[in-house]
Amino acid sequence: SLPKQNINIRLEKMYNILAYIARPDGSLPELNDGFIRWPINRLVNAGKQYQRDDFCYVGTSGKQGRAPRIASVAFENAGYYIMRSDWSQNANYLLFDSGPCNGYHAHEDKLNIEVFAFGAPFIVDSGSYTYDSADPFRAYFVGSQGHNTLLVDGCSQIRRWKADWLKARKSIGNQTIWMQKPGFDFAAGIYEDGYGRFSPEKPERPDIVEDVIHARKILFIRPDYWLIIDKITSQKPHNYQLLFHGHPECEACLATEKKVALQSKRNSACLYLIPAEKEKVQIYMKTGSKKPIQGWYSVDHHSKIPSTALIYEIPNTQSTIITTLVFPRSGTLTKSTPMIEPITVSDDRGIAYRVDSEIGTDYLMVSDQKGLKRFGGFQTYSAVAGVRLDNKKNIRSRFDS
């Protein structure tokens, strides 16, 4: 019943989101109950209809049209935040989902991420698989256990149990922060709606963990790597699990000192996932497990295959911060491993890290407080700041917010 003009405006906005969230290989991320069968070349017709060269560029993998003018973008109403190094097929790409839970197709995936790098998929949403609520795999693929976010005592997010979860609404009030500056992208979101043993239908007397707040901050050190900072606040101790689901084309390697890497079978690219607070974390992995269900990827409706889930467990802990260095490489694992270590910030006004790799040494700081912050021999009044040194310890760039 809408006027045709309004429908066209809405369709163009939909195509705009699809173009900007498209993965570097031309596929679309598996968000909620969406399936990966949607052909990206549909954007070519949309580009012609709306006279959008950027749609044609994405729909043809760069063979036609012009690349979008910006690489990283925030769709704040939907709650999708894309951090992208460039528009090449070898781009470093991270999608951060910090949006609301709306409608029958929504998953318990607040603060979920996907990561592609150097032409290979690494961290992915597990998919959908089935709509049959009686199938135990439905709860896995819809629940947080099938996503790259936090479990509390093995429990999932439970927004679908709320009375208003079917009401469509914008993500205003979702407490998501987005910053895009020369040298970095930054996003921060929060989940505080409780955890429970998820099932598609709410139990009559659900046992809900209500004292845990999960805040996730992601800092993209453009164009090279990310820091994922997970702050967990609780009134009593719990067992926490941070999940990272590898694509089925990846092999997981657990090296000494808790240096984990995903190696792509598609090419020689790899992705390191290294916790800064190594002494807090126990790391293990599950592939194609049925008891409990973990480590599965849905390639299409009613089709699933084993994949490896990396599980970073923080046992019997009240409140804590876990920071993960997410560092992609185009070469093999034989190169020197990147390193991350926490460093102090003056007067505990924030958190800071030193990152060492073959490209140099970086000092990075994130803070929620005002005033002067000193870290690693540098100082700033900003909320986000970094100094990048080359291998001769000369400053090659610096940034702040």
Image (cartoon, grey):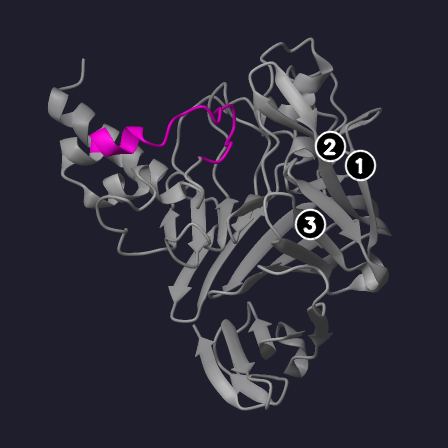
On the image, the x and y values in percent for residue 97 come to 50, 42
In whole angstroms, how far apart are the C-alphas of marks 1 and 3?
14 Å
Q: Are marks 1 and 3 in contact (CB under 8 Å)?
A: no
Question: 46 above or below 104?
Answer: below
Tag 1: amino acid: Lys
In whole angstroms, how far apart are the C-alphas of marks 1 and 2?
6 Å
Per the rendering, the mark at residue 106 is none
Residue denoted by label 2? 295
Q: Are marks 1 and 2 in contact (CB under 8 Å)?
A: yes
- Quadrant where the C terminus lies? bottom left
Which secondary structure lies at badge 1?
strand
Q: In the image, is 74 to the left or to the right of 328? A: left
Q: In the image, is 67 to the left or to the right of 205? A: left
Closer to viewer: mark 1 or mark 3: 3
Q: Residues within 10 Å of mark 2 (few under 14, many from 20)?
A: many
Q: Residues within 10 Å of mark 1 (few under 14, many from 20)?
A: some
Residue denoted by label 1? 286
Q: In the image, is 326 to the left or to the right of 116? A: right
Q: Between 290 and 359, which is closer to the camera in this rendering?
A: 359
Task: Tell me which residue sits at (57%, 39%) in the image.
Answer: 110
Residue denoted by label 3? 262
On the image, the x and y values in percent for residue 211 come to 72, 43
In the image, which residues are magenta?
Answer: 28-46
On the image, the x and y values in percent for residue 290 come to 81, 23
In whole angstroms, how far apart are the C-alphas of marks 2 and 3?
14 Å
Tag 2: amino acid: Gly
